[in-house]
Amino acid sequence: MNFPICYGIIPARYASRRFEGKPLAQILGKPMFWHVYSQARRCPELAATVLATDDERIFKAAMDLNVPVVMTRNNHISGTDRVLEAALGIGIPDSAVVINIQGDEPALEPSMLSQLIAPFISPEAMVSTLARKINVEEAVNQDRVKVVLARDGKALYFSRSLIPCYREKNKQAEYFGHIGLYAFRMDILKKFVELGPGHLEKIEKLEQLRLLENGITIHVVVTEYESISVDRPEDLAIVTQILSMKRINQRHL
């Protein structure tokens, strides 16, 4: 089987409960969305990467910086819905793979996208995501989503709770933290939106459970890379330092 053509879409909405206007936040002289796009376009498997926004300010800033951008509705219930509207708008075929690239991860490693795409060499792969090993201190945090895996790498369940639950103390307890990057075959992305929120999804507030509830498997790739997102204004200092170090290291290569 030939490897499918792959597209990256970065949802970037203006409204945010914890950080309004986050995509426009300045990091090293450029808005955050520019850094995400610049990192994503370094992934060799992506045929194109597009920003999907609901705000004229973000749209104009993207145009000024020559970042491909499409305007979407402002009433989507999730970033995945916005990704689908953008994918339909640019005419992505059902046979292609669409990557939902989080717009608040300006330090994204392009290799993470390559790892995410790799399972689609198999025609059986419908959806993929990433996870990395975390320690128990990270795992007990309910803001950190955990995933448990089957032996074949498929997701069994995602939860904000500590899973698996070790009934006895175990010094070798193993936990995997979910990284919120997703790759969908285009026809599955359409189906995901058509299905609407599921029962478990509503309970856990985790949209990926919609797939598992409906018998759609998710292949989980375990990565060594860490996901660093900007959730609040105070997180900008952390990613600014990381990106500054990346620039210094690249100069010395």
Image (cartoon, rainbow, N blue to C red):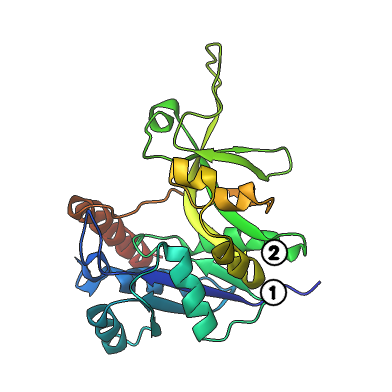
Q: Nearer the viewer, residue 184 or 230?
A: 184
Determine whether label 1 and label 2 are within 8 Å by CB: yes
**Residue 154 point in image, percent of width and height:** 68, 45
Residue placed furthest toward the right:
1
Residue found 53% across the figure and 43% down from its top? 200
Asked which secondary structure carries label 1, the reply is loop
Residue found 21% across the figure and 58% down from its top? 19
Q: Quadrant of the N terminus?
A: bottom right
**Horizontal arrangement in the rendering, residue 190 relative to residue 103 (left or right):** right
Q: Nearer the viewer, residue 204 or 104?
A: 204
**Residue 74 point in image, percent of width and height:** 33, 73
Q: Name the residue tied to disc 2.
A: 120
Using the image, tell me which numbered label, if any, was put on residue 4: 1
On the question of residue 114 being in view, the answer is no
Is 68 situated above or below 156? below
**Horizontal arrangement in the rendering, residue 155 relative to residue 24 (left or right):** right
**Horizontal arrangement in the rendering, residue 212 relative to residue 193 (left or right):** right
The CA span between labels 1 and 2 is 7 Å
Is 11 situated above or below 155? below
Using the image, tell me which numbered label, if any, was put on residue 130: none
Q: Nearer the viewer, residue 22 or 213?
A: 213
